[in-house]
Image (tube, rainbow, N blue to C red):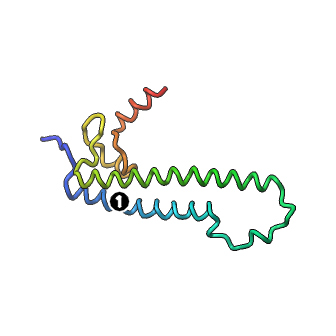
């Protein structure tokens, strides 16, 4: 039996649909994070809070904004990775490990649709970082 060296057009279409759905959710999440960062979801009650607001509250607000900024940055990277996966689908190179050249198992791609490494390649990469 011949070993597959790429996914079929039908399989690529399935992955494309999965990625497009995840991309839609990721973009909505990013918009939500941006809205929170700029208080566009605010009820307009910021100016009604007491003037003697505790310094702890301000510190908490700064920490929350920094965390939202980090989350937004991660979300932007995730969106970029998903968009790159769509390009690989169009090029019919999607699902091929960039280290081993073997097909990444479907199960992995369903969980991590933007994956470019097989589990084996990822484990080798992580063991080299220690």
The percent position of residue 110, horizontal first and vertical second, equals 36, 52
Count how many numbered circles sit on residues in the image.
1
Q: Quadrant of the N terminus?
A: top left
> Taking 54 as reference, is 95 above or below it?
above
Residue 88 coordinates in the image, percent (x, y): 28, 50
Dot 1 corresponds to which residue? 18
The residue most toward the left is 1
Label 1 Cα neighbours within 10 Å, binned few <14 / some 14-19 / many ≥20: some
74 displayed left or right of 119: right
Q: Quadrant of residue 10?
A: bottom left
Q: Residue at x 35, y 59 (%)?
A: 18
- Residue 25 lies, with reference to residue 125, above or below; the image says below
Q: In the figure, is residue 11 to the left or right of 66?
A: left
**Residue at 62%, 60% in the rendered image:** 37
Residue for point 45% across, 63% down: 25
Residue displayed at 56% across by 61% down: 34
Residue 84: x percent and y percent? 34, 51
In the image, taking residue 87 as reference, residue 82 lies left or right, namely right
- Image coordinates for residue 116, horizontal then vertical, percent: 34, 43
Q: Element under label 1?
A: helix
Q: Is residue 73 left or right of residue 12?
A: right
């Amino acid at each position: 039996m011949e070993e597959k060296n790429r996914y079929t057009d039908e399989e690529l279409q399935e992955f494309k649909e999965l990625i497009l759905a995840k991309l839609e959710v990721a973009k909505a999440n990013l918009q939500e994070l941006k809205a929170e960062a700029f208080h566009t979801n605010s009820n307009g009650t910021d100016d009604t809070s007491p003037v003697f607001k505790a310094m702890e509250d301000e510190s908490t607000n700064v920490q929350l904004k920094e965390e939202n900024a980090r989350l937004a940055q991660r979300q932007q990277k995730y969106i970029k990775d998903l968009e790159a996966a769509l390009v690989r689908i169009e090029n019919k190179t999607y699902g091929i490990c960039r280290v081993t050249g073997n097909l990444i198992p479907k199960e992995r791609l369903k969980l991590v649709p933007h994956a470019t490494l097989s589990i084996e390649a990822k484990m080798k990469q992580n063991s080299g970082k220690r």
